[in-house]
Amino acid sequence: MDIINYLKEHENKDMLRFLTCGSVDDGKSTLIGRMLYDSKMIFDDQLSAAESESKKYGTTGEKIDMALLVDGLQSEREQGITIDVAYRFFATENRKFIIADTPGHEQYTRNMVTGASTADVAIILIDARKGILTQTRRHSFIVNLLGIEHVIIAINKMDLVDFSQEVFESITHSYEELANELGIKKRYYIPVSALDGDNVVDTSEHTPWYKGKTLLALLDSMDISKEVKEESFRFPVQYVNRPNLDFRGFCGTIAAGSLKVGDEITVLPSGKATKVKSIINAGDISEANRELTCKEAFAPMAITITTEDEIDISRGDMLVHTSSMPRVSNALKVMLVWMDEKPMQLTRSYDIKRATSVISGSFDHINYKIDVNTYKREQVQELELNDIASCKMTLTRPIAADIYGDNRLTGSFIVVDRLSNNTVGAGMIVDVARRESDKSQEKNIFNIWNDKKQFLDGTNVKRTFKERQVVFLKMGKNIGIESDGKGKEFLRPVLVYKKFNNEQFLGFAMTSQKKEGKFYYKLSEDSYVILSQIKTYSSKRISHSIKRVSEKTLMRVHEKFMHLITPS
Amino acid sequence: MINKKRLTHLKQLEAESIHILREVAAEFSNPVMMYSVGKDSSVMLHLAMKAFAPSKLPFPLLHVDTLWKFKEMIEFRDKRAKDLGFELIVHSNPDGIEMGISPFTHGSKVHTDVMKTEALKQALNAGGYDAIIGGARRDEEKSRAKERVFSFRDTNHRWDPKNQRPELWNVYNTAIQKGESVRVFPISNWTELDIWQYIYLENIEIPSLYFAKEQDVVEYEGTKIMVDDKRMPESLRKTSKKEMVRFRTLGCYPLTGAINSSATTLPEIIKEMLLSTSSEREGRLIDKDQEGAMELKKIEGYF
């Protein structure tokens, strides 16, 4: 084939990431080695190196040990096991493949979880002589937990059971039960012999009863695109690009959905809304034209967005379509995988990194720990390495959260220990606590107001104040700034009566109109304390202070107020 | 409406790399990008320009010059810096210069240790960088296959292959203490073919040494090397002959093997690569020192 045409075709290749699950004895590394070898992507000199190493560590006699082609680090090679996660690559005419090669033993559950987190497809190896084992149950559970929808069950070592159709079908039958129990969506069964290459790349002459595709043909052709309704647009803001005063772009990778110029978007958790002014698709920019814009972009493009309004947007925020907003909450129900030697401690503070935001949080309660082999639930007080559990997580600030099943990238997080800086856990959001207001079937006006209030109370300014001060407060709803009819800030004088802490105080509203009687205390000719209008105020409302009354005056106000509220 | 849009594999790889580069710029206070002038560096530079457009690069590029690089590489490097307007830092090990380290007299191991590994540590210590972006790919060598995209290094720049942080989804742990650092590999998931295809597709400038030309070459330790200057021992230079050759990787000229080739265009190079039977690092003498050489070098702080 002409090379130019060849290149044109290959520019349009697709990409598929898959995970292989199995233990040393299942022939997993052999299977991967076989795929790499047979798809002609192993270069000759890597192969010749493998030949000399086979003599040192090999386990297959005179044949080339396929496993040595893939087992990475020296120390691991000597032990004859694969630890950690290794990534391998090969390509066919249609697709580029990324293999996450992970160990299968229970003590490496965290490695398998890691490999599964980015995979579209999983291959579960079953030894035809042994059938479904405890580890098969474990691998299937993890694959399902991490949201992998397509599972290929490769029934290996068929050569050792004389390529028996009966054996194959019996294992297929048992696995169907398991898959149904877990809810694995799509499963595919293939009889293979990795050692000799049967049904890996080439169709085996030993299994005339098998009419399906070979492993590679299946990987090459399976449809992994999600047929979903227009996905909700999710854009975790990653980086603010501000080269000069005229340009302020918000960079990030689209986690889901698509976006067009002019779309109405909301910034979460602040709740501010604006419109998309322009989209720069980083992928389209050439060196010559560094400011190319596009009309539309979709996941997983890396783009830069500019907005119509100059509103406050920073790293960690999430941009979403105003018409399709996720819940915003700091209380989440999660499935947590513990990955550290040091056990997880309830209520201890950890850093939770979700997409581009890092917020401290804690696990307040373990609902149950799940046994990955039996799927039984247990009550426990702490989590150890490789434990998987349902937990309640509380963050110190709310985030816009999706369910992992709906969105892998906005529904997942890692847990970072604040002392060691290690990644000690990984989690998937399974439920976002509803606010009280959502619980009633009919939302009343108060609830709607309450919803708005959460977003409107955006000020973080701390005001200092003292008792006996007369301060001007921003009144009205929980809005940072309230305007009156004339568009001016609506402020009201209040006397600080009792300071509870730096954030809150008890205060009396004041008026400039002349008032008399038991409800009022006269400070001066044009200022009267309204004793019946006492309430707790937030210091956030304070605009400024105008004066401070004497201790004696405050005591008189106190006495008159006590008199007023003493029951008759 | 059914949404079945998918990006091609190169566009997916590109988006992933840009995501990683932006994550570095957002999370670290003093990052630097390694620049080796080769094709992988050229791709990385191109991706970085895209990631931060219309701004300039938010980090400098660092070139560890062993003083034995091909002359053309240095010219190419300086021209790129001028054309694209990035900040370029060049460092060579002054102790090595004083000792007059030469691959011909001291051998590849000493030369690499002093002029590359040691020089790199000096430059990193001097710069106090908390993130060092490198162009390594997982398909290059077996020990790289297990390395994280954000790969933690202790205060001595050491890698602990058995104690790596789990890395899930596209969420990268960037937390470090003062003095520690992270090596970041944005093109981890690219293969050699991906790199070449991308260079072709995006029309990325690369040094002309990658293309076949008539050059003066000599046989040296089982490999063909180019006569780039007079520092090559005269006895060796005397044996030189003109051949049509090109290079699959670029490094120190005495340690970089040339291959006979007639490929003068990118498609021809790619065609040759697809049909070739030896992997990329064959041309690099450094890996042949011992089995597992790269793993040991990495633990010591080499990329």
Image (cartoon, rainbow, N blue to C red):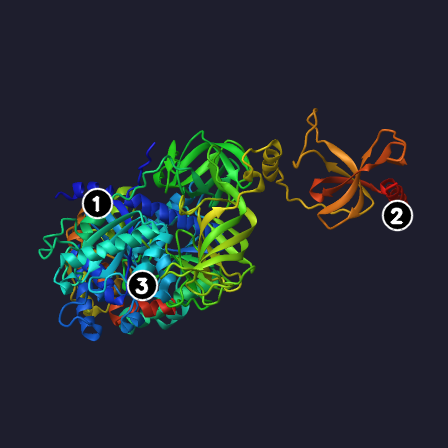
Residue A343 lies, with reference to residue B32, above or below; the image says below
Q: Where is residue A33 in the image (x, y as percent from the top left)?
A: 21, 61
Q: Position of residue A240 (x, y in %)?
A: 49, 43
Which residue in the protein does label 2 denote? A551
Q: In which quarter of the image is the N terminus of chain A?
A: top left
**What SS does tag 3 mark?**
helix
* Dot 1 amino acid type: Ser
Q: Is residue B207 visible?
A: no
Which residue in the protein does label 1 denote? A221
The chain ID associated with circle 3 is: A
Question: In this view, which residue lies farthest toward the bottom?
Answer: A56
Mark before the other along the chain sequence, 3 or 2: 3
Q: Quadrant of the C terminus of chain A?
A: top right
**Dot 3 alpha-carbon crowd within 10 angstroms: few under 14, some 14 to 19, many 20 or more:** few
Labelled disc at residue B180: none
Residue A121 lies left or right of residue A397; in this view the side is: left
Which residue in the protein does label 3 denote? A134
Residue B259 lies left or right of residue B140; in this view the side is: left
Q: Is residue B250 visible?
A: yes
* Dot 3 amino acid type: Thr
**Closer to the camera, A199 or A128?**
A128
Residue depth check, mark 2 versus mark 1: number of the one nearer the observer: 1
* Dot 2 amino acid type: Glu
Q: Position of residue B244 (x, y in %)?
A: 15, 55
Residue at x 58% of width, y 42% of height:
A436
